Image (cartoon, rainbow, N blue to C red):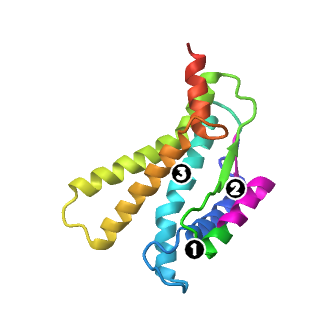
Amino acid sequence: MTLFAISELIGIVVLTIYLGYIFSGTLAKGKKFDKTDFKFSIMVAAPAVILHEFAHKFTAMAFGLPAVFHVFYEDIFTLMLAGVSIVLKAIGSPFIFLIPGFVSIPNVSDPLQYGLIAFAGPFINLLLWVGSSVYLKHAKKLTRKKMIFLYITKRVNMILFIFNMLPFAPLDGEKVFSALFSLF
């Protein structure tokens, strides 16, 4: 079982650029493209999303299951959502819905494994949320830019954790709660 396929590595690059665009405007509020803001957006958003998806992948692989990361353009539904999110971003919408990618894991028959694999992604967001919160609270002499970075990292990961843990299909929360209910 290979760690990454070439398509997954290409997907990471495309996804990183996409996330940089979607989350840009965090610092610079003007209409022009700002390279610094784009890089900042990538540093905040890409780890939150990519580490989330790879937590699913590596947890499944730890259980001996094949797992493949698929970026949004590999599925017609997620590709359409990406297109909608780009249009919403371009027109300045305050709300953008996106599904940047997903991990396919066939044949998970054990409900507990299924639940743990599903929880692995949101757990990463929980760690990033709590970690950045603790660091913000206890770090001495942070620059303004670092404080903003940690604050936005905290907020993005909080939103991703809470949203993904909602108990509705196809979100991770539905899989986690289904696995928990199957134990009783």
The numbered disc on residue 92 is 1
Above or below, 56 relative to 150: above
Above or below, 89 relative to 99: below
Is residue 134 visible in the rendered structure shown here? yes
Query: Residue 135 at x, y = what percent?
Result: 28, 54
Amino acid type of disc 1?
A: Gly
- Identify residue for label 2: 8
> In this view, which residue lies farthest toward the right?
76
- What main secondary structure does the magenta stretch of the protein show? helix
The numbered disc on residue 51 is 3
Q: Are marks 1 and 2 in contact (CB under 8 Å)?
A: no
The numbered disc on residue 102 is none
Write down the region rendered in magenta: 67-85
Above or below, 158 relative to 85: above
State the quadrant of the N terminus: top right
Residue 5 as seen in the image, left or right of residue 141: right
Above or below, 126 relative to 39: above
- First reached walking from the N terminus: tag 1 or tag 2: 2
